[in-house]
Image (spheres, rainbow, N blue to C red):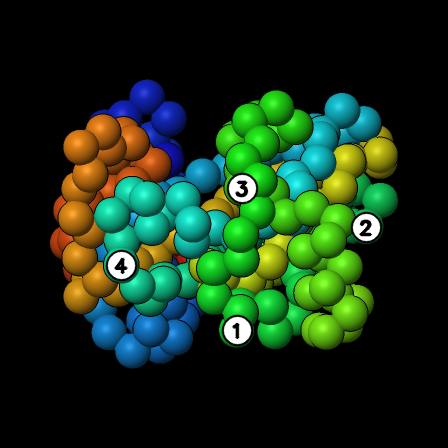
Amino acid sequence: MNETDGPTGSQTVADLSCSSRLLQSAKDVLGEDVYLFHTKCNLKEAITGEIWQWHQDFGVWHHDGLERPDMVTVLLMLDEATELGGCMYFVPGSHKNGDIAGTKDGETTSVALVALGRPEMTELISRHGEPVSVTGGPGTVALFHPYLVHGSGHNMSIHSRWHLYFVYNAVSNVMTVPDNPRPSFKAQPRAVPLQVRDEPTPQAA
Ligand SMILES: O=C(O)CCC(=O)C(=O)O
């Protein structure tokens, strides 16, 4: 979405990805220049929006050729995220476990995941405590580590829950492109550091 010459490109997303509130936060967390590994918008529609099983993100990105989890995901809520509406849940502290073995599941969610099942989650939650819901109004932002265990439930509400995700990678975390790489809109190897570029705030008429 941040590549404005692509079919799903959005100038708004491109501008947001360079705003100080998102980009500088990512740079502060990672302590160096960053670039966008990918962006996406998850449209969890009213009533029909489906679940994302418990999972970590870095396993897939490691297969994309990244050695280190020196990355941060910035979640930006476009709608109100509620528990009834299928908000995200985080298992606090779970990112400290590194890669946790799971089972590949290409059926349950529109994106194939390495899902963590009952034995893994029972052990993890017993150790780390109950998952926390990530709720908030439009404009709320949450940052999370690529090893953080997260998931979300069905949207049972009559309100859609749209989230934007900006995945920033440290420029020093060089991607070794594998033999069969995923398309660059999913796994961007070009590490061009982003510069903070704040757009003027629109004035009320
Ligand atoms: O949008 C959601 O509810 C879950 C998204 C997610 O877990 C992911 O993109 O890795």
Relative depth, front residue between 105 and 17:
105
Disc 2 and disc 3: Cα gap in Å? 23 Å
Q: Secondary structure at mark 2?
A: loop
**Res. 96 mark:** 1
Q: Which residue is mark 3?
A: 114
Disc 1 and disc 2: Cα gap in Å? 25 Å
Q: Amino acid at mark 2?
A: Glu
Task: Estimate how packed mark 3 is, as few (under 14), some (14 to 19) or many (20 or more) residues with alpha carbons within 10 Å.
Answer: some
Q: Earlier in the sequence, mark 2 or mark 3?
A: 2
**Foreground disc of the pair 4, 2:** 4
Residues at badges 1 and 2 in contact (C-beta under 8 Å)? no
Q: Which residue is mark 4?
A: 67
Q: Earlier in the sequence, mark 1 or mark 2?
A: 2
Q: Earlier in the sequence, mark 4 or mark 3?
A: 4
**Foreground disc of the pair 2, 3:** 3
Residues at badges 4 and 3 in contact (C-beta under 8 Å)? no
